Amino acid sequence: MQNQNFARVSALALGIAGVLALGQAQAAGFQLKENSVKAMGRAFAGSAAVGGDASVVANNPAAMGQFEQNTVQADVTVVDVDATFSGGGTDAFGNPLTGGNGGNAGDVTPIPAMSAIFPLGDTGLTFGAMVSAPFGLKTEYDPGWVGRYHALKSEVKTVDLTLSLALDVTDRFSVGLGLVYERAEAELTKAVDFGTAICANPSSAALCVAFPTVYGPQRNDGFAGIKGDDTGMGWLAGVHWRPTDRLTIGYSHRSEIDHELEGAADFEVPAAVRSVFNANPFPPARNVFTDTQGRAKLTTPSIDTLSVAYAFTDRFTLMGDVVRTDWHSLQSVVIEFDNPVQPDSVEAFEWEDTFFYSLGGEWAFSDAFTFRFGLAYDETPTNDEHRTPRLPDANRKWLSLGLTWNATDALELNAGYVRIDADHPTINDPENSSGAHLVGRYDSEVNLFGVSAQYRF
């Protein structure tokens, strides 16, 4: 019985599933939109319709047909996230959780992107390639904070290589198709309350009575961490239609991409706790909380984007986007461990599909300069029941500004800024695997700063 109980605690306390379903704080879920500074300046309105932005390689390949020259583009967006927790909670025995607020869980992270488009002569075909990061996360708390049994560090990185081809069916209608090669990496760490595990197990609870200064809830903290990576393939397709000289409509679909992340789980166990494991009469039980390999399946969601742009004058264009992200692909994550003592771990997320709405405009107030602005509303896929401190996600409101300088006929430089205000997310997690119950709220804000350059030849 002791072997089985400790094995279940080990699998659940690790909570590895969390890292495979978390996202960067500037977009709902773990989606990153920041692959174009020019589009960012208008809150990504018109992302699948407007020409002149090489990021359409990944946003809508059909729009590449609007390019008449070879074009290369480089973007970098710096994401400045502030997220501070206030609250507390109790351990499995009702004792108040000790520790501070964790400090600023956010970080300052650069997100680069590079794209290139090449029209193929008079064939009506256009080829494009792009390297971007469509999903990602990094949150990290101070050691010993009040929510340490829920999360310490969470980091997810994805890098996509997209190869796209567009075909001009007519002068006003184009179609496009792309292949996506995606690499995903994930890391999760957290503290493990071994003291609670020992005191809650009937076969070892007597130790907490006999040696109360050695064993007890929140007295025997350990550490668990896991890293994993994988590659996967996906596709995207789109259409681009200009029914009139002033109206443009674009639609694109990005497929789901399946991953099976594989990596290593690492544990740090206090000496007093390890002695309890070693005293188990069943040799296999002594391997609990030992380093092992593990794997988990992850599916990144499909994304549908509908964009509209209307040029009211030769210098002013108004754009809008509606984006649906199919987060229903993330209902739960099952973790399989190579160590037979540690059974599979299952964590439910039950995320829902979300919509992103944006409205933006461009005003070319001279031949050299274009001003941009935008507003957006971004829904969260999670809810109060399933929200965790690894991703204090909530609905968001965007306000964006941007500027383009046409330095020469071939070179343009862009700058953009976005301010994101999130609804104050709350945490109420009564089902933490260690028995800890964390309750509180977050004050968070996000600022995005971007620059890019485009060169045509």
Image: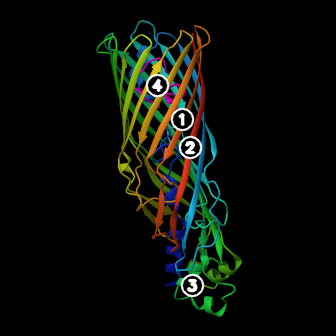
Q: Earlier in the sequence, mark 4 or mark 3?
A: 4
Q: Quadrant of residue 215?
A: bottom right
Identify the element where label 4 is drawn. helix
Q: Earlier in the sequence, mark 1 or mark 2?
A: 1
* First to last magenta residue range: 33-53
Percent from the top left, x then y, of residue 320? 38, 28
Q: Nearer the viewer, mark 2 or mark 3?
A: 2
Q: Earlier in the sequence, mark 2 or mark 4?
A: 4
For the residues marked 2 and 3, what is the alpha-carbon distance in whole angstroms? 42 Å
For the residues marked 2 and 4, what is the alpha-carbon distance in whole angstroms? 27 Å
Q: Earlier in the sequence, mark 1 or mark 3?
A: 3
For the residues marked 4 and 1, what is the alpha-carbon distance in whole angstroms? 23 Å
- CB of mark 1 within 8 Å of CB of mark 2? yes
- What kind of residue is marked 1? Val
- CB of mark 1 within 8 Å of CB of mark 3? no
* Residue displayed at 53% across by 64% down: 338
Label 4: how many Cα within 10 Å (few below 14, some 14–19, many 20+): many
For the residues marked 1 and 3, what is the alpha-carbon distance in whole angstroms? 49 Å
- What kind of residue is marked 3? Cys
Q: Earlier in the sequence, mark 2 or mark 3?
A: 3
Q: Write down the residue under mark 3.
A: 199
Seen from this angle, which residue lies furthest left?
243
For the residues marked 1 and 2, what is the alpha-carbon distance in whole angstroms? 8 Å
- What kind of residue is marked 2? Val
Q: Nearer the viewer, mark 2 or mark 4?
A: 2
Percent from the top left, x then y, of residue 413? 60, 19
Identify the element where label 3 is drawn. helix
For the residues marked 4 and 3, what is the alpha-carbon distance in whole angstroms? 57 Å
Q: Write down the residue under mark 4.
A: 57
Please tell me the numbered disc located at residue 33: none
